[in-house]
Amino acid sequence: MIFAEWKPLDELVDKLKAHKKVLLVGCATCVAECAAGGEKETETLAPLLTMALKKQGHTVDITTATLEKQCEWEFVEELAEKAANVDAIMSLACGIGIQALAERFDPMPVYPGVNTSSLTIREEDGVWAGRCAACGDCVLDQTFGFCPIARCAKSLLNGPCGGTRKDGKCEVNEDVDCIWNLIVERAEQRGQLESLAEIRKTKNWSNSRHGGPKKVVREDLKK
Amino acid sequence: MSKKTQNSNKNVEVVVLYCQHGLSDDAKGSDWSQKSTDVSVRAIMMPCSSKIEVPYILKILQAGVDAVEIVACPEKSCKFLIGSRRAEKRIEYIRGLLEKIGYEPQRVGISRKLSQSPEKLIELAKARADAVRSVGTNPMKGE
């Protein structure tokens, strides 16, 4: 899932204090899964911001809505009526949803309520870990299902770096597995250790953000 | 007279959210309220303390109530095994959020009790009222 976290509360309060009526908009997909911007978090943040603003002497009327997806125009349109009655919007969706609202409701100010940071898996309740860096050139078949781009602190394609701790953890963070240690272990288990001796060439980053803004057109799907 | 001093003479509003399984058999009922000179108590029965979600409590405080007391079952007595543990974690989370926005965390508390009579719930509410009396009225009061 796309992972996001609330921005610091004082930063959010600072953005809203110049407004009278604000629409706080959640998204029921990825940001709900990572407990940052689903309906529950939206209904939590609204009273919290109202109280924080009041404490600082600002009376702001915050209404809420949670869309099924903020990244689909059909769902964004559901906000039209509510958006007509406010002077600002704060979105708890990922950066995609925030931009969709900013585009649809221009020139209304649309504030990000979260910072979107990574693509994660929920390891267990309350624990998320990065798994994908959207690099645009997947090598997971060569690395036994472990991503060295997202999960190695140095994003090494030819690891390990030599800094692996004795317990198999990363030298950068003792709580994080050295992913190259796991890659080597799995290669050994499968009897394919020699495959790691092959040098993986310099990565082609042009299909990632390094190649400029992404736009894909599928003529077969266009109307 | 400071705001805090003013509050010490005023009526403190407390909402008690209690697990239905923590009440004595002869005292089970639904919602009720009681008002005295210094404390107003509104008690709301819940199916389990784990049903108390974070937004519920924040919306109660947003409405101007001075304090919220959760009455959950002791951990080993919880009919839903981890319900009261979940409630406790949520209360800790809420207290952290309140601190971040400059509100006093003691406005929300949790007790783990069994076989509670309505009189004992009122005692818990009064203890919560005493905990917030010194920090002043909820700034949201009157909104």
Image (cartoon, rainbow, N blue to C red):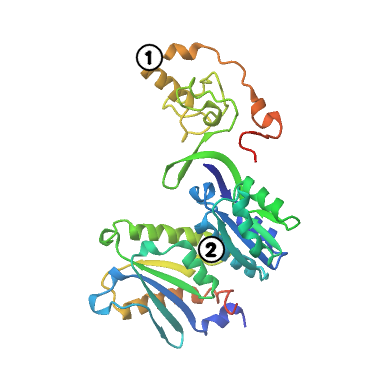
Query: Quarter holding the N terminus of chain B?
Result: bottom right
Nearest the camera: B7 or A181? A181
Instruction: Please tell me in which quadrant of the rendered image residue A105 appears.
Output: bottom right
In the rendered image, which residue does mark 2 sit on?
A: B98
Seen in the picture, residue A147 relative to B20 is either above or below; the reply is: above
Seen in the picture, residue A21 relative to A159 is either above or below; the reply is: below
The crowding category of the residue bearing disc 2, from other C-alpha atoms within 10 Å (few below 14, some 14 to 19, many at least 20), is many
Q: Residue furthest left?
A: B25
Nearest the camera: A178 or A96? A96
Measured as percent of width and height from the top left, residue A205 is found at 65, 25
Kind of residue sitting beneath label 1: Gly
Kind of residue sitting beneath label 2: Leu
Is A218 on the left or on the right of A183, as rendered? Answer: right
Measured as percent of width and height from the top left, residue A6 is found at 58, 52
Seen in the picture, residue B115 relative to B38 is either above or below; the reply is: above
In the rendered image, which residue does mark 1 sit on?
A: A191
